[in-house]
Image (cartoon, rainbow, N blue to C red):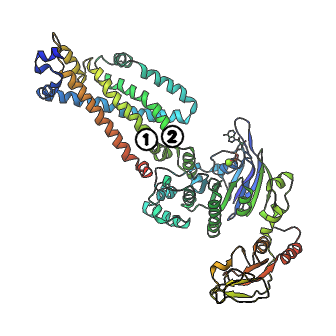
Amino acid sequence: MIRFDSVTKRYPDGTVAVDDLELVAASGQITVLVGPSGCGKTTSLRMVNRMIEPTSGTIWLDDEDTASMATHELRRRIGYVIQHAGLFPHKTIVDNVATVPFLLGTDKKRARSTAMELLERVGLPAHFAKRYPAQLSGGQQQRVGVARALAADPPVMLMDEPFSAVDPVVREQLQDEFLRLQQDLGKTIVFVTHDIDEAVKLGDQVAVLRVGGHLAQVATPAELLSRPVDAFVAGFVGRDRGYRALGFATAGTLSTRSEPTVATGAPLPTGSDDDWLLAVDGARAPQGWLDMRASAPAGATVTDGLLHRGGTLVTQGGSLRAALDACLSSPSGRGVVVDEGGALVGTITAAEVLELIEAREPEPRT
Amino acid sequence: MTVLAADGASSSPLHFVEYFLDHRSEDLGLLWSHTWLSVVPVIVGLLIALPLGWVARRHRWTYPPIMSITGVLYTIPSIALFVLVPPILGLDTLDPLQVPIALTVYSVALLVRVVADGLASVPDETVQAATALGFRPLERFFKVELPIAVPVIAAGLRVAVVSNVSIVAVAGTIGLSNLGQLFTQGFQLSTPDAYYPPIVLGIVLCVLLAVVLDSLVVLLNRLLTPWRRAVAT
Ligand SMILES: Nc1ncnc2c1ncn2[C@@H]1O[C@H](COP(=O)(O)OP(=O)(O)OP(=O)(O)O)[C@@H](O)[C@H]1O
Ligand SMILES: [Mg+2]
């Protein structure tokens, strides 16, 4: 747990970057600091590892006052990831990752073998180990940055816009991998971003700061989207927040109707009650929709080329947003529901999802 | 040229090889002391410039005064510096340390800026990351900042070592034994007629020495920066 206890930072030129901050970052959770440029996110983060010293107030790491520890020892217990990774250009990738274990005096061979495991964990092939940072793409460097922060297995991680310098596709990949990693590792993470979508996607808890270093609201992502405390937070959280909030709402298990199917490779059926017929493979995983209005030569089989694949899938326990999207994106208008293993359960219509949305608790509880 | 040819083969500038073979042990001794005088002050100068450059970089307000002072030192003519060192430091004239000290002053003057600029070439986020990972200031300096600054510092060392080779020759004219004495000998032997071989020999040996020392610095730089070559390919 990290606790900011009325922490203020006033720079020598008089700028108040952080004003009387009270915040708890719970153990094993991701706390996101989000807000417009200059609102004091980086300053708040760097006061935790004392790259910046608070003007007043205390930051507690569990029950220890960070001000009472030697800075280098404090920092070796805290992973740190920044934009552009900040890798050491003169060290190989594996030695970059092993930096903190080397500092701690861990046996070189053991430190390197741990580093190799971590590289695999963040999705980098082993042959990258002997390369230098400049030989990697931005996204790959960022993965190395994460691995380096994890190398000494610190309980706490500080991340300052780690994914903001890569293109949107890579960013989404890195975010998904990061969430998977966190599920295994359960670190206490403080994550800084100026991107509210990233905050809502990654945070267990989101703290919105406003310029001047004032904390505007701390809440779960769902609560933030549905109940912003004031006009500033509402404006910052942005448009479509009603639709985005559906991403956090589920209807327990979606009830579905059964859907007639045809197996891929089977002879093309002729005559159907419906304009659209769902094709599944041998494991009953949905493959796409057959347009029954199109004329096909007699004796043809169901092949990939005939299938419309536009529709998204929703799992049975999925969010209402995913359910609605499955309906809206399906050429037949029926959203395809699958089980955890990806096999077809049935379909649901947009009208049915809307009923679920309306029947939902008006204000989600946390 | 026609006059020279008429004077006979032995005074032709091209006869420096014979001159060298005739005075081999003496000339090799001069070459050796010249080498020593060129290299050692640069090494000592670098050792002094490292902390000064670090201070200039670390405390930004010290950069302008440090650079002005070292800049002024570098503009003092070498002969004047050789003469000034003994009285300032209370040494005898022609103390064996007189010239090495003056040369060290030149090297420091040149290298402080080089070290400060080399440290400035280290990306800011790299320094930040090192600090955040828990490097203490000295660890960070020797394990992160200095290694990354090597290419810039090596470029400065090349200039320092080569210019030292020529400044050392000037010290020969005030009586120190090094390749500069070949020039003095050449002048002395040039009465009444011009006699070039020792002068040409001095020039050739100085150039060779400069080329060899320069190549050594280049080689050392390559050995210390495998990461730069890996990236270039
Ligand atoms: N060393 C400093 N001296 C004076 N003022 C500073 C210093 N560092 C930051 N500030 C000011 O403090 C405020 C907060 O800066 P900070 O870097 O924490 O913002 P941020 O929220 O991280 O912004 P961004 O999203 O742009 O990274 C800004 O107004 C900034 O100008
Ligand atoms: Mg910032």
Q: Which mark is residue B121?
A: 2
Residue B151 relative to residue B193: left or right: right
- The quadrant of the rendering that contains the N terminus of chain B is top left
Could you tell me how far apart the alpha carbons at marks 1 and 2 are, in whole angstroms? 10 Å
- Name the chain letter of the residue that bears numbered label 2: B
Residue A64 relative to residue B4: left or right: right
Residue B96 relative to residue A18: left or right: left
Please tell me in which quadrant of the rendered image residue B168 appears: top left
Instruction: Where is residue B104? Give x, y as percent.
Output: 37, 27
- Name the chain letter of the residue that bears numbered label 1: B
**Vertically, is B149 above or below A3?**
above
Front residue (pair A296, B73):
A296
Same chain? Circles 1 and 2: yes
**Vertically, is B96 above or below A19?**
above
Q: Is residue A316 visible?
A: no
Q: Is residue B13 visible?
A: yes
Instruction: Where is residue A362? Give x, y as percent.
Output: 89, 69
The amino acid at mark 1 is Pro
Residue at 54% x, 47% y: name it. B126
Kindly indicate whether the residue at mark 2 contacts the one at mark 1 (C-beta within 8 angstroms).
yes
Residue at 43% x, 22% y: name it. B73
Q: Which mark is residue B151?
A: 1
